[in-house]
Image: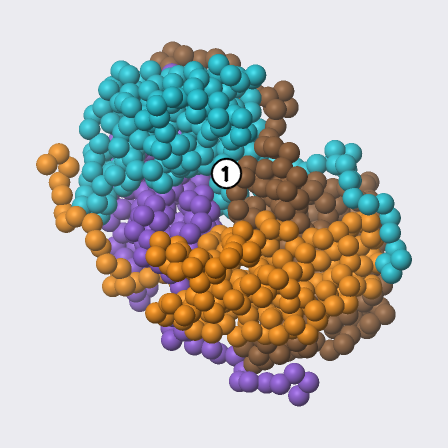
Chain colours: A brown, B orange, C purple, D cyan
Amino acid sequence: MVRGYKLTELALQKSFSDTVWLLLRGELPTELESKMFGAILTIAIDHGPGTASGLVTRISASVKTSIQASVAAGLLAMGERHIGALDSAAKFFIENKETADLADLVAELKSQKIRIPGFGHAVLTKDYRSETLLTIAKEVGFYGQYSKFAEEVEVELNKISSKPLPLNVDGAMAAILLDLGFKPGALTGVFLIARVPGLVAQATEEAQDDTGLRRLSEDEIEYTGPSLRKIGV
Amino acid sequence: MVRGYKLTELALQKSFSDTVWLLLRGELPTELESKMFGAILTIAIDHGPGTASGLVTRISASVKTSIQASVAAGLLAMGERHIGALDSAAKFFIENKETADLADLVAELKSQKIRIPGFGHAVLTKDYRSETLLTIAKEVGFYGQYSKFAEEVEVELNKISSKPLPLNVDGAMAAILLDLGFKPGALTGVFLIARVPGLVAQATEEAQDDTGLRRLSEDEIEYTGPSLRKIGV
Amino acid sequence: MVRGYKLTELALQKSFSDTVWLLLRGELPTELESKMFGAILTIAIDHGPGTASGLVTRISASVKTSIQASVAAGLLAMGERHIGALDSAAKFFIENKETADLADLVAELKSQKIRIPGFGHAVLTKDYRSETLLTIAKEVGFYGQYSKFAEEVEVELNKISSKPLPLNVDGAMAAILLDLGFKPGALTGVFLIARVPGLVAQATEEAQDDTGLRRLSEDEIEYTGPSLRKIGV
Amino acid sequence: MVRGYKLTELALQKSFSDTVWLLLRGELPTELESKMFGAILTIAIDHGPGTASGLVTRISASVKTSIQASVAAGLLAMGERHIGALDSAAKFFIENKETADLADLVAELKSQKIRIPGFGHAVLTKDYRSETLLTIAKEVGFYGQYSKFAEEVEVELNKISSKPLPLNVDGAMAAILLDLGFKPGALTGVFLIARVPGLVAQATEEAQDDTGLRRLSEDEIEYTGPSLRKIGV
């Protein structure tokens, strides 16, 4: 039984993502919530073997271990700078959404070298995933105060930044999930659910192709410690 | 891009579980594959806080750590005896499905005290999840040689076992996934994907209720080591 | 080569804990540093199967998985409330060690229900490990400003607390490691090194005794969700 | 209390590595056992940031997460091909140490393309760590049947191999630990204990230098999937 519903009935009548929503929210989603939430999970499902979590999952699979271990390793390569920022972004949105002067706030943070979570990307200059999610949010009616505020922050941030700082998929997901009624503190978990299939696929591919142990070769490493010393000297 | 499709188009047009299938199989599922695969993921989504993985996830969340850490800990409490048996079960089905005398085989394994993976459950005497999945498999046309063999093994096993050894959800999933064309070695990963939402829900609930550190109290532990010794004596 | 020394020479001439110090600090320890650091690592080596990390390691080992996975799971059950508090305790000591009125500070924190990291224990009312470490610190000359401050906090805290809040081993280790010159941010790692042997021993014992899958039985779990509902009702 | 001894007395009188031995073996080591075991732990303490486990620990630390998570991730990048082979090597030594014709056995395994665990290294052609450990083993009297057999296998293997296959540190540790009386199934855990300080040092260095998120850049990744496809086409 999940939140009062029988698993056997859910399996017959409801989609996997609707049952995920039920687990997290306690109620089945409406049709529009279902569409929005399905799109959020799907768009975050994978981002390739070069991400911190994808790379770690593949290195782990290359040493020959269990798939559980490789996927767990991938999760442990998620943190403030990769996927783990949703709840920090949500905190920022909640605390500042009624700020009187957003340009001021953004400038102040920049001067203190504080990075706003949910903006910027290691590779992308514009995050097409955020754009798609916000477009869907507008269509199905979940473009609310947080989504709007996130886009306003993006505008102000890019007025004063020397390099592009797009609203990234973490930031867009955080804003829309808040507009969908998710509680702060419960958002990063949604991204974990979305990305685990990507990690499973990376680990399975690595194990089945089996091209050998992944590590750095000696000439990729620079030793920066002291030169040879003798004990007792 | 996932297997040739744009993520943004998948997010608009395809369900999350269909995109999971695409990631793992390289093609989008047919309508019947989609129904079967969605049911498999949904029925395995959670099995409560008392399972090894659910309990470990909650203990981890209770010490105050990140959700990534708690879910990873839960994955690491999956092994041969809990969720991790799908690929072993698949191996058993593949290697033995054409055995001439199944009753003989099962008796022989019992005499050697070898447990067949995918049968038996710590709590359930009949696994209603297996029954539901096999019913759906029959309806949508994926009740093939492996599903049939799994049920035959269940029958033989219970003729000679002193306690009920139901075809459990691991075993049923393994058989149906083989009938769906999944390759051996790629099955346990499907269960991980299915169960991660359950672990996320357990961790989130534990963190939000926050009833304190979970551990055993001293009177729940029995010290079985030697009595007090002195160094050098 | 480790920090300029050959591993082969270290293995012949230096103890394991001295080489740990070398790795973390960049220099070999003096004789007194060696004695203090060895005592710190030894006293924290294990605290039984009932701790959050010990229990999680055992549950993981009971499902039949690798020792790496079980020890990693144990590490993931360390957080602010169990072992992971050393760096928070150090931060508190550094920020407040020159406070003009410690009694005031402690009262203020109590009134805000802010728990000072490094004090209190789930089971112990007086932490004999802290006492031993501080005794050694006095003997070998590392009872410095942080150790002294930690004991002063303990005194003030227990004047106003309704239940005993001993300086626990996390707090004592944090204070002494600061007095030994360890940098804040590098302290929790020392406890991980110290406790991993305990986790390895728990996992090995569990695997070798092999008393079956550890989980909660159904009657140990209370379902607190809604009663049975029908989809679409 | 650890195996009958008080932790407080052990901390005052015994080294960390002696207490590790006590935990794992149930008795304090003799002086010679202590020397041998200390050397084993010390020589395996770290092998740089380029190893699978070192690299994964650093990637994890670079995303900004807890040190527990980064060290756990490193443990999960240990498997059959990196550190996790000790117990497989031990199994091989035990099962084959009385083989009548070792050259035959080695040739047969080569023809079946079965790799003997404990031999070969991704970077080293001769493992100086094994040589040092075996030298010490001879000196202190623990060069027994397993150490001897491991060296014999190395000789036979390199007679017929086209590339060097040195007895690596995993293999040498496995052999000597068996000669020290450790039980098969309990050996990999010893390497975990030895290497965790290295992982802690890698994670701490990464966090303190903080040179940003480690991942592959787009031009380091080759997309090998199908070219652009349209849904429903």
- Secondary structure at numbered mark 1: loop
Which is nearer the eye, A222 or C104? Answer: A222
Q: Along the horizontal axis of the image, is B119 left or right of B97?
A: left
Q: Residue at x 34, y 57 (%)?
A: B111
Q: Quadrant of the C terminus of chain C?
A: bottom right
Q: Which residue is mark 1?
A: D79
For residue D123, say whether it is visible: yes
Q: Position of residue C111 (x, y in %)?
A: 43, 66
Q: Along the horizontal axis of the image, is B75 left or right of A97?
A: left
Q: Position of residue C50 (x, y in %)?
A: 32, 57
Q: Residue at x 25, y 55 (%)?
A: C126
Image: B134 above or below B196: below
Which is nearer the eye, B105 or B122? Answer: B105
Q: Residue at x 51, y 57 (%)?
A: B100
Q: Along the horizontal axis of the image, is D176 left or right of A52?
A: left
Q: Tell me the quarter of the picture where residue D177 sits.
A: top left
Q: Along the horizontal axis of the image, is C102 left or right of D55?
A: left
